[in-house]
Amino acid sequence: MPTITYEGPDQLARDGATYLAERISAAPGPRVSVGLAGGSTPAAVYRQLRQHDLNWERVDFWLSDERWVPWNHSESNGNMAYANLIAAVSARFLRPRWAPWLEPDESAAHYDAELRSLHPRDHAPDLVLLGMGDDGHTASLFPDTKALQVQGRWFVGNEVRSLKTWRLTATIPFLHRANQLVFLISGASKAEMVARVANGDDLPTTRVANGPAPTTFLIDRAAAAKL
């Protein structure tokens, strides 16, 4: 499990943002495709990343997952990404549709089509950022949910019965197309799951991380405590 460990969340945010900025800058081609994660750790990284002087106009940001809520909702990953990063840079940002008359998988199917248009032929996502929950989920690929088994789609609606809600999420096959996956993880509450992923336990994060896409974990010492 390729891992870079930082002293604490502040260093992870600062130096992790530098790590990401270098990879965005070095990505080949006229456009750079970057998938964004939700969560408090990515939010802190985004606030540092927006301070880097990059050619933002060539960057296409999209979401690796989204909650089924309106765009301006406090729990929306897109709302968080916009407030902490997108509003401060000149990148393009693609978000899943939301409307009270839409079903989650209708929105996901439209976003699937947008992602396929963004990645024609052999053009893979350059960089996808992911987090990890205390239960080992990543994106909105939760344990014991149907999205874990999807093969033909890149983005789906996923019912998470344990939370009594719906999510929209990138699928494992799409994430495995990426040129690089980067997990951003901090805090002692994640230490047990980080150790289980390193041990190869069957968790959504393990399934994503152990695929063909090159993967790096950026974590702080609290999250790495049980490695």
Image: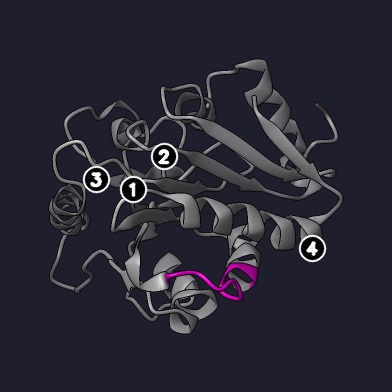
Specify the segment rendered in magenta.
48-55
Q: Amino acid at mark 2?
A: Leu
At 72% from the left edge and 42% from the top edge, which residue is drawn? 190
Q: Alpha-carbon distance for marks 3 and 4? A: 34 Å
**Mark 3, other Cα within 10 Å: few <14 / some 14–19 / many ≥20:** many
Q: Position of residue 41 (x, y in %)?
A: 65, 59
| Residue position for label 3 | 156
C-alpha gap between disc 2 and disc 1: 7 Å
* Residue under label 2: 141
* Quarter assignment of residue 194: top right
Tell me how far mark 4 sits from mark 1, CA to CA: 28 Å
Provide the secondary structure element on which disc 1 rests: strand
Q: CA distance from mark 2 to mark 4?
A: 27 Å
The Cα–Cα distance between marks 3 and 1, rounded to whole angstroms, is 6 Å
- Are circles 3 and 1 on residues that touch, CB within 8 Å? yes
Q: Residue at x 16, y 47 (%)?
A: 116
The earlier-in-sequence mark between 2 and 1 is 2
Instruction: Residue under label 1, please give it.
Output: 169
- Report x, y in % for residue 188: 81, 45
Left or right: 2 with respect to 76? right
**Helix, strand or loop: magenta stretch:** loop
Dot 1 crowding, Cα within 10 Å, few <14, some 14–19, many 20+: many
Query: Looking at numbered disc 4 in the image, what kind of residue is underneath it?
Result: Asp
